[in-house]
């Protein structure tokens, strides 16, 4: 099943690339966010894939999200997909966009695939099994989060959005010890933490559950955590009518030094 899912997501990625490499239309959705032909092509390819592989499991996609909470709150397990995360990066043609497929069980992302077709990289995480990365057509290899370095050994690596910063994010950084900040689009930021290339991704700005679920499964299977920035409890899906996430932070380990900076940034 895992192999067929990864192959299917790669096939959807090839459809996305064929649109990326030519001129494409950009529409504006009701929430003012952009939508391209590629978002819809990927949505249809992924829905076909999942309906073929597991017809009994319902699907919630960013591009077909009008399912009332009264219906989906009864779902014990479902697929949650973001066919194209980082649409702004897709339009800017910087390659920093991803296809995202998560399996949610009782609100918890237990399996996830994140695929970046231009970068030819895929991350997979499965609860109880582990996390892996595949790049440049090679085999899947195991990944894990890294221990938080002591600041005198190496600066912490902090990742932030390329297109959606916030004053809370800047306030958080101001309270940290020595660190470097890298900007990146889409769910790739969570994957950087999962593979031990970054230490923290504070997302102190809005996102939706489909933006994070697949990569949360990768991060947690790699030994890290995706925590509500206020409660420091793991993010859960499908708990309420709104699909918006709370502000959150992605980390390898909890540590009093960044928790103090986080509390201070949220009080301002
Ligand atoms: N005001 C807002 N409300 C909800 N989600 C938002 C938002 N502004 C940005 N996002 C989410 O942030 C994602 C991009 O994140 P980043 O800036 O880290 O690349 C977008 O994904 P899409 O590209 O799938 O729409 C979008 O879902
Ligand atoms: Mg998205």
Image (spheres, rainbow, N blue to C red):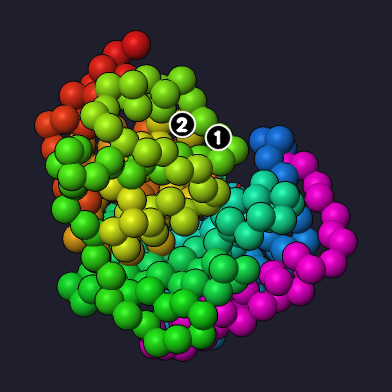
Up/down of 149 relative to 123, above or below? above
Between 156 and 137, the residue placed more toward the observer is 156
Callout in the foreground (2, 1): 1
Query: How far across and how far down the image is residue 265, in percent?
Result: 32, 19
Quick one: label 1, few (<14), some, or many (20+) residues within 10 Å?
Answer: few
Which residue in the protein does label 2 denote? 205
Between 172 and 238, the residue placed more toward the observer is 172
| Boundaries of the magenta span | 1-29
Query: How far across and how far down the image is residue 25, in percent?
Result: 85, 55
Which badge, 2 or 1, comes first in the chain's sequence? 1
Does mark 1's beta carbon lie closer than 8 Å to ligand 1? yes
Q: Is 245 on the left or on the right of 52, as rendered? A: left
| Magenta segment main secondary structure | helix
Query: What residue sits 46% from the left and 61% below the top?
Result: 80
Tell me the distance, in whole angstroms, between the alpha carbons under discs 2 and 1: 7 Å
Residues tagged 2 and 1 counted as in contact (Cβ below 8 A): yes
Please tell me whether residue 9 belongs to the stretch shown in magenta.
Answer: yes
Q: Secondary structure at mark 2?
A: loop
Which residue in the protein does label 1 denote? 164
Image quarter for residue 164?
A: top right
Up/down of 249 relative to 103, above or below? above
Query: How far across and how far down the image is residue 51, in percent?
Result: 53, 79
Image quarter for residue 152?
A: top left
Query: How far across and how far down the image is residue 245, in percent?
Result: 41, 39
Q: Quadrant of the C terminus?
A: top left
Q: Quadrant of the N terminus?
A: bottom left
User: Looking at this rendering, what residue extends furthest in the top direction?
Assistant: 268
């Amino acid at each position: 099943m895992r192999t067929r899912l990864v192959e299917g997501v790669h096939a959807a990625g090839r459809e996305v690339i064929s649109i990326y490499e030519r001129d494409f239309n950009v529409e504006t959705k009701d929430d003012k966010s952009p939508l391209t032909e590629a978002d819809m092509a990927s949505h249809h390819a992924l829905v076909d894939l999942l309906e073929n592989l597991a017809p009994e499991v319902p699907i919630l996609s960013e591009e077909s999200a009008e399912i009332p909470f009264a219906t989906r709150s009864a779902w014990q397990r479902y697929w949650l997909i973001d066919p194209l995360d980082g649409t702004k990066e897709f339009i800017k043609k910087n390659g920093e966009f991803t296809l995202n497929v998560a399996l949610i069980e009782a609100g918890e992302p237990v399996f996830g695939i994140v695929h970046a077709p231009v970068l030819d990289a895929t991350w997979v995480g499965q609860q109880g099994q582990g996390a892996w990365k595949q790049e440049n057509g090679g085999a899947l290899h195991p990944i894990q989060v890294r221990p938080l370095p002591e600041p005198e050994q190496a600066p912490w690596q902090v990742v932030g959005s390329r297109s959606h910063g916030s004053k809370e994010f800047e306030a958080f950084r101001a309270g940290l010890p020595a660190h470097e900040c890298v900007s990146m689009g889409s769910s790739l930021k969570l994957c950087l933490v999962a593979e031990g290339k970054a230490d923290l991704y504070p997302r102190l700005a809005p996102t939706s559950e489909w933006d994070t679920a697949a990569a949360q499964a990768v991060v947690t299977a790699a030994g890290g955590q995706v925590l509500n920035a206020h409660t420091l409890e793991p993010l859960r899906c499908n708990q309420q009518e709104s699909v918006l996430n709370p502000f959150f932070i992605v980390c390898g380990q909890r540590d009093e030094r960044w928790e103090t900076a986080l509390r201070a940034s949220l009080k301002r």
